[in-house]
Amino acid sequence: MSDINLLQAVNLALDTAMGMDDTVLCFGEDVGHFGGVFRATSHLQEKYGRERCFNTPITEQGIVGFANGLAAQGMRPVAEIQFADYIFPAFDQIVTESAKFRYRSGNEFNVGGLTIRAPYGGGIGGGHYHSQSPEAFFTHVPGLKVVVPRNPEQAKGLLLAAIFDDDPVLFFEPKRLYRAASGDVPEGSDALPLGSAEVVRSGSDITLVAWGAQVQVLEQAADMAEQDGVSCEIIDLRTLLPWDRDTVADSVYRTGRLIINHEAPRTSGFGAEIAAAIQETCFLYLESPIMRVTGVDTPFPLALEKEYMPDHLKTYEAIKASLHY
Amino acid sequence: MTDQRKADAHIVHKPRFLSGHAMKIPTLRVLQQNGKVYKDADLPDIDETLALKIHDTFLFVRALDERMLASQRQGRISFYLTATGEEATDIGSAAALEPGDVILPQYREQGALAFRGFGVERFMNQIFGNERDLGKGRQMPIHYGCAELNYHTVGSALGTQIPQTTGVAHAMRAQGQPNCAICYFGEGAASEGDFHGGLNMASVLKVPALFFCRNNGYAISTPTHEQYAGDGIAARGVGYGMQTIRVDGNDVLAVLLATQQARRLAVEEHEPILIEAMTYRLGAHSSSDDPSAYRSRKEEDVWRRKDPVARFRHWLEAQGWWDEERENAARERHRNQVMAAMKAAEKVPAPPLHELFSDVYASPPWHIREQEENLTAHIRRYPDEYKKTAWRLGDE
């Protein structure tokens, strides 16, 4: 399908999954007739009926608890949390229940069919509660998978993989790209692999790693650096848990330099895990310290959002600092 | 989409506040303490076979609880949790279900699991966390679970099973199964947000679920008047637009009757039902607390005289289905079986090291495989310090 946006790609993945498998159900706040506040579930109720795409009351812990029960009974629920900022009432159901269902029962029961979708991230003037990137809370939890797509093609392929994966998956969608990113998306039901990063631009001087909407930021910064004759390798991590250390390490063996970019605050962000693991793996190959370009350690701002964001300029400066260390 | 509130249906012109106690929900009781049925009472569907199975489960759970609490005191196990005094709630309700109905327990429903046929060996293997434990030694004693018996694995977190029950029941309806899901929880767990989320969703989505509250008077040390102010848990069901019933939880015939009728409504009408069973936790919350610190012996004695097992036994004897001799023989048999199973289970080794790492995911990702290799190598270096697992690591 040519030139569809990220939201349409999400909708297409849901439509494809529901068409393939009767056990796939979509639900959440305003998800039914209205099609979700962002319209990610548009027309799914019309097409598949109220039994398979429906509204729920406003209770995130109820929604995820309900989804855990469905998955334990052999269904493939796709629960929408309207904004990732509102996932915290469901934190207990995700961390205490979804993540441990298989382990604690000795594999008597599992909720592997579960997918939780949530729009995340800034760039839309949403302030504290419509902008956060909570992925690191969940990458700390054994038993979960955490996936973030960067564009429409990735969104469709990775969401299909998440829905049909046999472990519970948190799927964070970069909402500032919902309508801003468009591109060609393949027809059909092919999924992209989970747990596998992608080198989206090859280069030889420095490795840049990000996920979701920040991959675009890396591309902008790399374009600037290229004017200075610097060749950047860009990696989209795609899955944060379990993350693809080998692809990052293979790149850093060659470049000797690494910058990680994420929107979430710096302290205990997922960048810290990558930095620690790569220095363990690549210590003797490093030419400069691993650097992080991230949100600052404040709540997400409103008026000063542009200042907060780890943008291409901050990334460009970090590239120069790394090269001239 | 329409507004269906009927906002103009009943208009008044003077303010009138409804008391939080305006609704008085009655309690269903069929059986008197002396074993006689009230003369106008309805009876559940029950024959001799079912009645004797219920009583046998009572006696098994009494034997299990008595022995395992003693074992905890002797230091043989780390933790235990008795159901003494409230056995009629879970056993009476489980007796109303079909094997295909899914049970989502809190943690004090060993009676329901025993009724389903879990067997004393599996109880013991879980309690000792040995390599035969279905849960692979991953949880504290009493966290039983069994897929074959449709009994979800116990988790320690309170109330999380409540919205899950709504999901299980919704799946059953979607799959066209003629079954329901039943959820057990205490009156304390009903204060959790998951209770509200789960029951509200069940009512709105119309799922075949039974929400069974064991109101046993205490949440660890906290009495009910410090837990809620309304008319128990049942009053909330009405607020959710849910069919609701309160029963005497020490009257197994009342519990059975209410649950049989509730199950029929759930499965045939796709209606969720709230059942509140009024009972009393005669034992401590767990082996880790001492009730004498927060309640009187006198209060306990009042409830000891309402023993659900004795009440049912009187009825059984009046039917001519049971006598002293059979009672003594059954108690002896259960005591011996529990003791033998315990002695066998404590000799079974702990699960192998691999079970520390399995089942985190459907198949282990690289980082977990790497951590398993590293830990295995470390234990090989210090086999005497990690005796539980080192002996069977085998050769490299």
Image (cartoon, coloured by chain):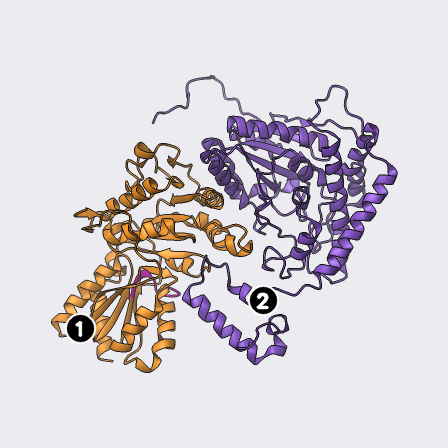
Chain colours: A orange, B purple
Q: Is residue B351 above or below residue B61?
A: below
Q: In the displayed image of the protein, which residue is found farthest to the front?
A: B395
Q: Position of residue A107 (x, y in %)?
A: 53, 54
Q: Position of residue B294 (x, y in %)?
A: 72, 49
Residue at 65% over, 42% down: B116
Q: Position of residue B376 (x, y in %)?
A: 52, 74
Q: Quadrant of residue A23?
A: top left
Q: In the displayed image of the protein, which residue is found farthest to the bottom?
A: A284
Is A264 inside the magenta-drawn segment?
yes
Label 1 in the same subunit as label 2: no
Residue at 27% over, 73% down: A251
User: Which chain does the residue under circle 1 lie in?
Assistant: A
Label 1 crowd (10 A; few <14 / some 14-19 / many >=20): some
Q: Closer to the camera, A169 or B49?
A: B49
Q: Name which residue type carries label 1.
A: Ser
Q: Check disc 2 and report the residue beneath it.
A: B352
Q: Check disc 1 and report the residue beneath it.
A: A231
Label 2 crowd (10 A; few <14 / some 14-19 / many >=20): some
Q: Closer to the camera, B276 or A106?
A: A106
Q: Name which residue type carries label 2.
A: Pro
Magenta range? A261-269
Q: Position of residue B396 (x, y in %)?
A: 52, 77
Whole-angstrom CA distance, mark 1 to mark 2, is 50 Å
Q: Quadrant of the C terminus of chain A?
A: bottom left
| Left or right side of B210 for B342 | right
| Left or right side of A161 for A232 | left
